[in-house]
Image (cartoon, helix red, strand yellow):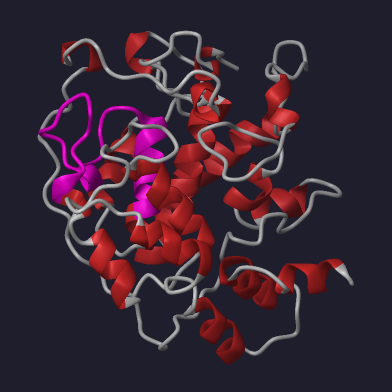
């Protein structure tokens, strides 16, 4: 059995992307297989796990791994047709139901105050057809002088973070795929790519060392954690084409062209107006829950929940 045969003998979420990326399959065959994701296998299981109130795991950011935020990102990675009725039915109540833990007045697709989280919210919202322009505008205004982003900017940081920046870049790329090309967004994204390229994707500028050994670890589903594979896919074709020997599409779930099962164009809906001013994290009520001890979620970039967090390591 070849590696491609092994991938094709799997869940529809892997099969449709393998047909697209590795096999000489027609667009119709790819679209038909993709249409199964929401109704069979992992995708169907995630949709079936939705709580009656429209969230997952009883929360928004928490509990890590099973809450709404992480579950919708995994669903995005599986790549169901976003126009599928089952998918739209599941996403429809999320905006009002999944309020952000630190301030329930912030609805899900409004985003919150940290660029690492907002970047991923833009990814999720853009993919599932929500209007994420207001969150994108906020992210563009928060880009730092070195081209990166950092959740610790409001606390005095003047340098970007690998972990935060990769989440924002993922969001901006998905936003352009969904909303169409934007000179302003592309310019910001290219500056963010240069931030990574200047550091050879994972090295400090000061001494050339790799600040976090975990960046050499690759796994799925990935959370906020930066790793050496992600920039080769999140930044589209630009970084692979400029980095000798770098794989062009190491993660097949990232899309450059995605046919819908029924050939429909994407529908865009408005998620509501953004709060006029983001309240600082310090104003939230104390006592937020933490990730379970020993879970992989405990290593994610959530600066204000864990001051030992890697995104505080500025590069």
Q: Does the magenta stretch include residue 190?
A: no
Q: Please state the extent of the stretch shown in magenta in the rendering.
A: 96-124
Residue 302 figure quarter? top left
Residue 210's x, y, as percent?
A: 74, 19
Question: Total number of numbered labels?
Answer: 0
Q: In this orientation, which residue lies closer to the viewer: 46 or 314?
A: 46
Residue 103's x, y, as percent?
A: 16, 27
User: Seen in the image, is 187 located left or right of residue 294?
Assistant: left
Residue drawn at x 20%, y 17% is: 280
User: Seen in the image, is 275 located left or right of residue 122?
Assistant: left
Q: Please, is residue 232 above or below residue 217 in the view?
A: below
Residue drawn at x 55%, y 14% is: 314
The outermost residue toward the right is 1
Residue drawn at x 56%, y 91% is: 28
Q: Please, is residue 205 above or below residue 174 in the view?
A: above
User: Seen in the image, is 193 located left or right of residue 151?
Assistant: right
**Would residue 182 be seen by someone viewing this image from the given angle?**
no
Q: Please, is residue 59 above or below residue 305 in the view?
A: below
Q: Please, is residue 63 above or below residue 304 in the view?
A: below
User: Seen in the image, is 254 located left or right of residue 248?
Assistant: left
Residue 254 figure quarter? bottom right
**Would residue 97 be seen by someone viewing this image from the given angle?**
yes
Quadrant location of the N terminus? bottom right
Residue 25's x, y, as percent?
A: 69, 86
Residue 288's x, y, as percent?
A: 27, 17
Q: Does the magenta stretch include residue 109?
A: yes
Q: In this orientation, which residue lies closer to the viewer: 239 or 171?
A: 171
Quadrant location of the C terminus? top right
């Amino acid at each position: 059995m070849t590696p491609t045969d092994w991938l094709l003998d799997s869940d529809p979420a892997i099969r449709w992307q393998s047909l697209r990326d590795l096999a000489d399959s027609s667009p119709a065959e790819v679209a038909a297989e993709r249409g199964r994701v929401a109704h069979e296998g992992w995708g169907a299981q995630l949709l079936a796990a939705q709580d009656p109130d429209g969230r997952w795991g009883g929360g928004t950011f928490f509990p890590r791994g099973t809450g709404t935020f992480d579950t919708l990102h995994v669903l995005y990675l599986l790549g169901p047709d976003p126009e599928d009725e089952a998918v739209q039915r599941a996403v429809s109540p999320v905006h009002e139901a999944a309020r952000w833990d630190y301030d329930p007045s912030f609805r899900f697709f409004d985003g919150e105050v940290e660029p690492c989280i907002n970047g991923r919210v833009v990814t999720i919202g853009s993919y599932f057809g929500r209007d994420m322009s207001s969150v994108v505008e906020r992210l563009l205004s928060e880009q730092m002088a070195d081209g990166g982003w950092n959740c610790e900017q409001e606390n005095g940081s003047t340098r970007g973070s690998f972990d935060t920046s990769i989440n924002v870049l993922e969001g901006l790329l998905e936003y352009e795929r969904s909303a169409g090309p934007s000179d302003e967004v592309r310019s910001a994204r290219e500056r963010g790519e240069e931030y990574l390229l200047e550091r050879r994707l994972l090295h400090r500028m000061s001494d050339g060392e790799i600040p976090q050994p975990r960046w050499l670890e690759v796994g799925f589903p990935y959370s906020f954690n930066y790793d050496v594979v992600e920039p080769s896919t999140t930044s589209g074709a630009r970084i692979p084409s400029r980095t000798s020997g770098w794989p062009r599409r190491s993660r097949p779930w990232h899309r450059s062209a995605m046919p819908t099962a029924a050939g429909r164009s994407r529908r865009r809906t408005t998620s509501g107006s953004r709060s006029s001013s983001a309240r600082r994290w310090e104003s939230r009520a104390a006592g937020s829950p933490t990730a379970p001890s020993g879970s992989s979620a405990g290593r994610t970039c959530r600066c204000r929940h864990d001051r030992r967090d890697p995104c505080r390591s500025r590069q």
